Amino acid sequence: MIIVIKNGCDKKQLDNLTSWIEKQGLRIDRSNGENTQILGLVGDTSKVDVDLIQSLDIVESVKRIQEPYKLANRKFHPEDTIVDVAGHKFGGNNFQIIAGPCSVENEKQIIGIANAVKAAGANILRGGAFKPRTSPYAFQGLGGDGLKLLLKAKEETGMPICTELMAEKYLDLFEDVDIIQIGARNMQNFDLLKTVGKTKKPILLKRGLANTIQEWLMSAEYIMSEGNPNVILCERGIRTFEPYTRNTLDLSAIPLLRDLTHLPVIVDPSHASGIAKLVAPMSLAAVGAGTDGLIIEVHNDPPHALCDGAQSLRPEQFEDLVKKIDVMLPLVNRERK
Ligand code: PEP
Ligand code: MN
């Protein structure tokens, strides 16, 4: 339920209203816009008397929210949420590019790629240390050692880093990680979502392989309901019957989400397609669809990459793509800062 408060209302009356609501066991999420103040009620509002609230002097309107996601709902929070990652902002008219290898392989590799993607214009470095692989016999990532190398690359380049957390037991290692990625396979690992919800870190929440937009927003709701509002959604393709591509990039999710939620949404064209040649066209299509950013896999030697080489761009291909993105950004009213 949302309550829109009249402009310039009496503060005492507003305090009375909010304490009355809280006494009913409900939480209030406040959203202060330029001209409006909205109280979003979280919890079981079925017994709340709408007519009574509507009759108050200070109340402009009261509306029940039908969707099961509340904190993530655009109706709760009409203005875009801006997620700040070490000064790089996601949301509003900002545009961010996260780039780097699928996995951290060794020091030379991660530092070399970090320098290359930075020079090409990426703002944030990606690289998996803990890898969710389909086969238990495949390279599982360097784990804690990989994270140390990623932190070294951060120190050398000054780039914030984004990397995947697969289990709560590793959280302590993530203290200096700037964006915690929750991978597609863990989108509905509710305990993990609650764990990252208790941190204040920006969370990159990837869409599950076979999850609906509503299920995805409910996962964001899990994180937000624990107190962490810093959620960035990432469309990374979904399973369909089409075998030519690794997944099918659901670009319609971008403009749809713009209405449904105030959270920033980025696109991962690498996992969505699985094919390096498709990464540039899908990136540009995503920019056209209004994405707030991209996360792109880049490798110095794709044929020998330990993971996801087939979908990785070489640094020079990435550089060429960034130039094209920059040509498009003014058309969609975005700026890369
Ligand atoms: C990744 O980013 O390397 C990854 C494993 O992504 P996803 O969870 O989207 O498959
Ligand atoms: Mn990958």
Image (spheres, grey):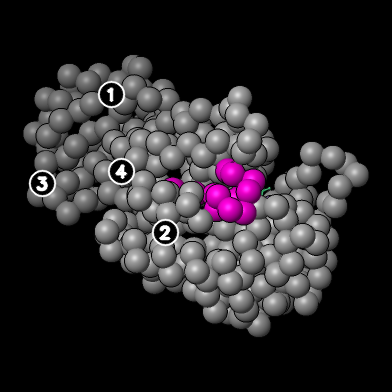
Give the residue type that dot 2 points to.
Answer: Phe
Q: Which mark is residue 161?
A: none
Q: Residues within 10 Å of mark 1 (few under 14, many from 20)?
A: few
The percent position of residue 170, horizontal first and vertical second, equals: 76, 54
Tell me which label, 3 or 4, sits earlier in the chain: 3
Give the residue type that dot 4 points to.
Answer: His
Q: Which mark is residue 90?
A: 2
Magenta stretch bounds: 265-279
Q: Which mark is residue 7?
A: 3
The residue positioned 9% from the left and 49% from the top of the image is 8
Q: What is the magenta segment's predominant secondary structure?
A: helix
Q: Which mark is residue 77?
A: 4
Marks 3, 4: nearer the viewer: 4
Between 293 and 148, the one nearer to me in the picture: 293
Tell me which label, 3 or 1, sits earlier in the chain: 3
Q: Which residue is mark 1?
A: 64
Q: Is mark 2 within 8 Å of ligand 1?
A: no
Which image quadrant for residue 103?
A: bottom right
